[in-house]
């Protein structure tokens, strides 16, 4: 029998995972999996659990994770700091689940689980952020506080609307940052209000990055917004980002791809990693760990770069 370690966040989304546990275990058992279950106990519990099981022998065949993107991020942290990197299966149960949408995970617990049971292993890129890791986004500046300052109860009730409402609350707090940005032998300086380094088709459940990207091409999509001259211009720039293709390389929006970028600022920047608080730093080195982890996904639904 194959061994699976099932980690889930009982409070993610609306907590509906609790009523699905018996069905999930039953489905796994029917497909010859021996299941070990652990509900997360506290912040970073998933990370510490993964590090522990990756150090034990015999190894598990699969780490199955259910929760929001933050829970998945903890699992990734644990795997990237382990010598034995077990394949990951992800059943989304959070509010936005950007990464799950990017790999076209079917909606619903049962469909998502079936896509893992019958799926294939594919190696995807994972980002380094100084000594931390992220799955699909590292961002700073305007609205980066929204994801982790919006109360879980509000997210459960209002879904994506909760992020919009919280974002509007932060309009009067937007500030400009003096940054130096280095990548691919180029260095530029300027005033910026927002930036994101992404490996995803969607951001915040609302922003679509289009189809010109791959989850394992060794490159990140970088979007930077320079400081507009007025709040009205800023509002216009942010609104235009709903369609990223229309906003690429305009007067205020710069877009490029890179595998390695360094950003330094005069003041500490507040960062978000996969929608969770990434801390405050004034210097960050972000680089792409090409095909670092194996995910079990619907095999025909990933844009894969052949080597």
Image: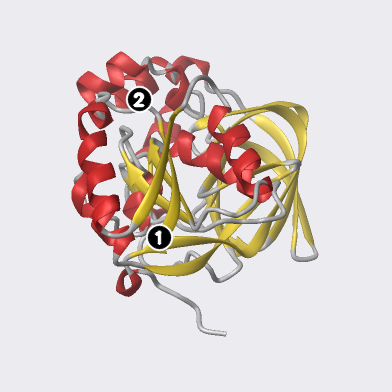
Residue 102 percent location from the top left of the image: 36, 56
Comparing labels 1 and 2, the label whose residue is closer to the camera: 1
**Can the viewer see residue 156?**
yes
- 21 sits left or right of 302 in the view: left
Question: Mark 1 or mark 2, which has the lower sequence index?
Answer: 1
Element type at mark 2? loop
Number of other residues with Cα within 10 Å of mark 1, as a class: few under 14, some 14 to 19, many 20 or more: few
Point 40% across, 29% down: residue: 9
Q: Nearer the viewer, residue 67 or 243?
A: 67
Q: Nearer the viewer, residue 132 or 247?
A: 132
Q: Residue furthest front?
A: 1
Point 31% across, 69% down: residue: 301
Q: Residue furthest bottom?
A: 307
Determine the CA span between mark 1 and mark 2.
Answer: 27 Å
Residue 159 percent location from the top left of the image: 24, 28
Q: Nearer the viewer, residue 179 or 95?
A: 95
Of the 4 image quadrants, the one containing the N terminus is bottom left
Q: Is residue 174 shown above or below 223?
A: above
Number of other residues with Cα within 10 Å of mark 2, as a class: few under 14, some 14 to 19, many 20 or more: some
- 6 sits left or right of 55 in the view: left
Q: How many marks?
A: 2
Element type at mark 1? loop
Point 45% across, 17% down: residue: 149
Of the 4 image quadrants, the one containing the C terminus is bottom right
Q: Which residue is mark 1?
A: 1
For residue 10, the mark is 2
Residue 89 percent location from the top left of the image: 41, 53
């Amino acid at each position: 029998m194959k061994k699976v370690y099932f980690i889930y966040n009982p409070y993610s989304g609306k907590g509906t995972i609790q009523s699905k546990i018996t069905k999930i275990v039953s489905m796994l058992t029917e497909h010859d999996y021996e299941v070990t279950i652990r509900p997360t106990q506290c912040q970073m519990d998933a990370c510490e659990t993964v590090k522990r099981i990756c150090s034990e022998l015999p190894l598990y065949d699969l780490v199955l994770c259910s929760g929001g993107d933050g829970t998945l991020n903890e699992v990734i942290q644990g795997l990237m700091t382990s010598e034995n990197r077990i394949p990951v299966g992800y059943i989304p149960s959070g509010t936005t689940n950007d990464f799950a949408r990017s790999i076209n995970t079917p909606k619903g617990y049962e469909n998502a689980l079936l896509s893992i049971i019958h799926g294939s292993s594919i190696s995807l890129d994972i980002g380094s952020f100084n000594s931390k890791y992220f799955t699909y986004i590292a961002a700073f500046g305007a609205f980066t506080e929204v994801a982790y300052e919006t109360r879980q109860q509000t997210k459960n009730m209002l879904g994506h609307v909760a992020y919009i409402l919280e974002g509007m609350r932060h309009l009067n707090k937007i500030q400009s940052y003096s940054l130096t940005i280095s990548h691919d032998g180029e260095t530029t300086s300027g005033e910026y209000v927002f930036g994101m380094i992404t490996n995803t088709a969607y951001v915040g459940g609302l922003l679509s990055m289009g189809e010109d990207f791959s989850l394992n091409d060794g490159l990140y999509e970088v979007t930077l917004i320079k400081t507009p001259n007025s709040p009205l211009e800023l509002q216009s720039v942010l609104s235009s980002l709903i369609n990223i293709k229309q906003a690429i390389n305009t007067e205020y929006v710069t877009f490029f791809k890179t595998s390695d970028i360094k950003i330094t600022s005069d003041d500490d920047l507040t960062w978000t990693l996969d929608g969770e608080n990434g801390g405050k730093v004034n210097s960050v080195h972000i680089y792409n760990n090409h095909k670092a982890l194996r995910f079990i996904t619907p095999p025909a639904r990933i844009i894969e770069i052949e080597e």
